Image (cartoon, rainbow, N blue to C red):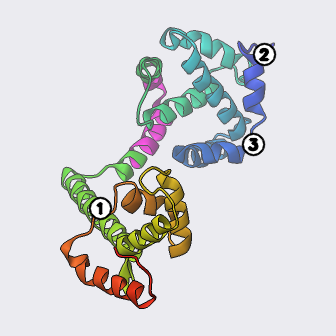
Amino acid sequence: MMTYIEDEQKFNVIQAHDLDFFLDSEPINEKIYRRLLVIQQVDKSMFEPLEIFHWAYYFLYRVDIDRHPEAMIDSYFSEMESWDPYNDRYCSNLVFLTVRSILELKQKLSKRQDRFLEQISVVSGDWESYSTTFRKIVRELKSGNEISCEQAEELKEAKRKIDSLQKEVEDLQKLIEEMEEEEKPDGTLKVRCLLIETMLNSLGVDIANIDQSKISRFAAYMLGVKEKKLYNRVIQPGIALGDYHEKEVNKVNKLLSDLGLDLEL
């Protein structure tokens, strides 16, 4: 019998994949593979598990691209049976049980996948022991992934606590960074910047009208801090001193006076 494949080019692409590719593609494939090996030994069958995966993934592809795959099941079987060495739907059944099982474990199905799964589930219900075996595999994997409502609520609460803790850590880290840049030995960043501006002004720099980013670049170099943060936090908003800066300002003015400079903050 001649083999007929609707999309032979795509089938050739899929056929190029080795067994490990499929075993790594879906969690269920490892279990399906083991079950196929048992069936192969018990029934002394000629099929190879890799061939089953080749055809299964070809029909998964067809389900995705055909407009109404649920109405094409007979056509799919005809394609499959043109290759099936038993010519009795033996291998075809294994292929479509594999397709059914993979779809049953997907978290979200497209409308095409859902309609096809519904129909193939009805058709495969008559395949007795093999169908039952594959459904057992699906149930085992689903039960392993399911959690109780209580566990789900506990996970939600744990996530809320983690998110809250993470925000606290981020806020603390931000505060530490600000403190590291704001507070320097024997002086604050704002007062130091004001001192630099005062000295530049005495040298003839028009502080009020010059590009503030240039001031920020110069001050950052002199103070050994990051230019961007210095600009955003000190220079661009304007240097506004509080009452707690008074002691430091007096100290700086004393230093300037001791140097004989006619400057004052």
Image quarter of residue 257: bottom left
Q: Earlier in the sequence, mark 2 or mark 1?
A: 2
Say which element carries label 1.
helix
Q: Earlier in the sequence, mark 3 or mark 1?
A: 3
Disc with the residue nearer the chain's start (3 vs 2):
2
Q: Quadrant of the N terminus?
A: top right
Residue 49 within the magenta-colored segment of the rendering: no
- Number of numbered discs: 3
Dots 2 and 1: beta carbons under 8 Å?
no
Q: Is residue 7 left or right of residue 103?
A: right
Q: Please tell me whether residue 219 is drawn above or below residue 45 in the rendered image.
A: below
Q: Which residue is mark 3?
A: 18
Image side of residue 178 versus residue 206, left or right: left
What residue is drawn where x is 35% and y is 66%? 174
Magenta span covers which residues?
Answer: 123-140
Counting from the top left corner in percent of width and height, residue 135 is at 43, 38
